[in-house]
């Protein structure tokens, strides 16, 4: 990682304060190693929102935000979305290589064998109000997995960590579907081992015990692709949350729950639900202009949901694939004239021609089209962020595993620029 280059920090008189090493990865920008900065200068770096800080090194995912490139373990997202299944991508993210056919069979079998949840876990659902947001239920129930798998889990043991990853990938769809069924008062559907990962989820989510379920292969493929597109995205807010929670050695299911909580916010994974609400609110192509004006107005809190990204200053490659998936799904369902899809396409066109969005390099992100596809698949909008969580679980657990096995790993502990009162003495209450 180290290269020969160093950067020199100089003071106002142009005198050298200290020299800092520069590190190079396999691709992407170099980084200045500031680990010894405080020791050498008595100063910290200040970087709210971590806009210029690499919090770790990682081999899992690479993004070139200027070029709009996304690679999982070196493979372009476009090739993975076209040629692989979600479970193959899970294997890749966890193990670093695409599986051979026998490795894939074994992996798929292990996941299938862990899709059921402990029967006592079903009791947790009953404690929630029926109208609770599914993300609230999922935060609670995935957190509760830590109560079922704690004493027997040694996080320093690779086998235990691998089993934990399998359990998480296997059980998340079951829990997500249960949270939906609970909220609409329908019975939980047990997993069926003869179905594929996505078919099984669709059945648990959309079928009832009263009817046979015949999954449409085009819709199954579309949902599988959506999960691939959400599977990982390097050090995004929820993944960084999982890493920070895990850095103390906490139970991994509790750490994943921290990630789910972070994902819920509208600036992150909650944006897919917010996009659909926004499109409904705009209502008609003729109303787009006033909303574009509102989005540009500093004094108006309204922002175009599904637009903009911290890293992408170009089209998010996932949004392109999601838009193509949207076309496929709507065609298959005979919904070519879908009102919200037409509205979204026009909103995108107008925004991308607007000086404000051009100058700030604001493009559609992964959340812009995902809600329209999910809605067409029969997923209600309050479940959209849960679908994101289902896809991202593998990324969270892959990063957690990478962190735990990193010999340089230490507890995450940022510092601060203190701006509060300086030392003062307590005045007795009567005298205040
Ligand atoms: C995800 O990081 C990841 O990897 C996340 C993610 C993943 O896979 O994990 O990709 C998933 O979270 C996608 C993002 C979903 N969120 C949204 O779609 C919500 C709308 N977008 C924004 O709020 C915003 O663009 C963020 C949160 C995505 C990025 O925030 P930044 O990097 O802190 O950028 P910023 O808010 O400071 O924006 C820079 C400028 C600002 O204007 P100025 O102060 O410079 O004048 O662009 C403006 C912003 O006001 N701006 C927008 C805008 N997004 C940014 N203006 C109007 N509409 C928008 N959507």
Image (tube, rainbow, N blue to C red):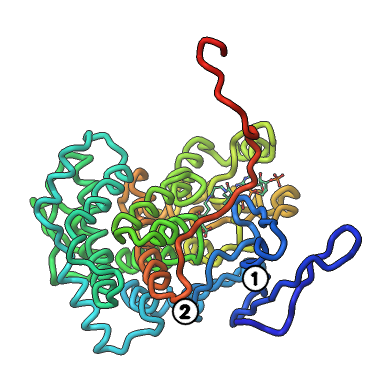
Q: Nearer the viewer, residue 398 or 12?
A: 12
Residue 42 screen position, x and y as percent: 69, 57
Residue 78 in view: no
The vertical placement of 370 against 161, above or below, is above
Q: CA distance from mark 2 to mark 1?
A: 24 Å
Labelled pair 2, 1 in contact (Cβ < 8 Å) = no
The image quarter in which residue 150 lies? bottom left
Image disc number at residue 73: 2
Dot 1 corresponds to which residue? Answer: 33
**Element class at badge 2:** loop
Res 393 → quadrant: bottom left
In this rendering, the answer to whether 312 lies above or below 125 is below
Pinpoint residue 68: horizontal percent, then vertical percent: 61, 68
Q: Position of residue 41 (x, y in %)?
A: 72, 61
Foreground: 111 or 43?
43
Residue beneath the point at 30% across and 72% down: 156
């Amino acid at each position: 990682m180290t290269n020969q280059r160093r950067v020199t920090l100089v003071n106002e008189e142009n005198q050298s304060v200290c020299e800092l090493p520069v590190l190079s990865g396999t691709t992407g920008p170099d980084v200045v190693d500031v680990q010894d900065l405080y020791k050498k200068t008595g100063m910290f770096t200040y970087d709210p929102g971590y806009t210029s800080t690499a919090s770790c090194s990682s081999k899992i995912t690479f993004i070139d935000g200027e070029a709009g490139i996304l690679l999982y373990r070196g493979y372009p997202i476009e090739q993975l979305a076209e040629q692989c299944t979600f479970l193959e991508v899970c294997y890749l993210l966890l193990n670093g290589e695409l599986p051979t056919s026998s490795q894939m069979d074994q992996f798929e079998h292990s996941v299938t064998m862990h899709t059921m949840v402990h029967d006592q876990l079903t009791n947790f659902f009953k404690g929630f109000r029926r109208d609770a947001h599914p993300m609230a239920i999922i935060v609670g129930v995935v957190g509760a997995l830590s109560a079922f798998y704690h004493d027997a889990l040694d996080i320093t043991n690779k086998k235990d960590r691998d089993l934990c990853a399998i359990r998480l990938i296997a059980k998340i769809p079951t829990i997500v579907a249960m949270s939906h069924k609970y909220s609409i008062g329908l019975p939980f559907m047990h997993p069926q081992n003869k179905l594929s990962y996505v078919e099984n989820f669709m059945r648990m989510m959309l079928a009832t015990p009263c009817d046979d379920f015949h999954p449409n292969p085009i819709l199954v493929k579309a949902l599988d692709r959506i999960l691939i597109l959400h599977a990982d995205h390097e050090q995004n807010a929820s993944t960084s949350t999982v890493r920070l929670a895990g850095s103390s050695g906490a139970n991994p299911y509790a750490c994943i729950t921290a990630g789910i909580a972070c994902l819920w916010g509208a600036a992150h994974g909650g944006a897919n639900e917010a996009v659909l609400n926004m499109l409904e609110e705009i209502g008609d192509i003729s109303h787009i202009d006033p909303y574009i004006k509102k989005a540009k107005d500093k004094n108006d809190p309204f922002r175009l949901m599904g637009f903009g990204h911290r890293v992408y200053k170009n089209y998010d490659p996932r949004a392109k694939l999601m838009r193509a998936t949207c076309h496929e799904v709507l065609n298959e369902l005979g919904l070519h004239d879908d009102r919200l899809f037409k509205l979204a396409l026009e909103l995108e066109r107008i925004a991308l021609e607007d000086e404000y969005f051009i100058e700030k390099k604001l493009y559609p992100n992964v959340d812009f089209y995902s809600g329209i596809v999910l809605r067409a698949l029969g997923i209600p909008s309050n479940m959209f962020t849960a679908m994101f969580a289902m896809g991202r679980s593998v990324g969270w657990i892959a990063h957690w595993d990478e962190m735990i096995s990193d010999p340089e790993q230490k507890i995450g502990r940022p510092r601060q620029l203190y701006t509060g009162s300086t030392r003062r003495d307590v005045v007795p209450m009567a005298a205040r």
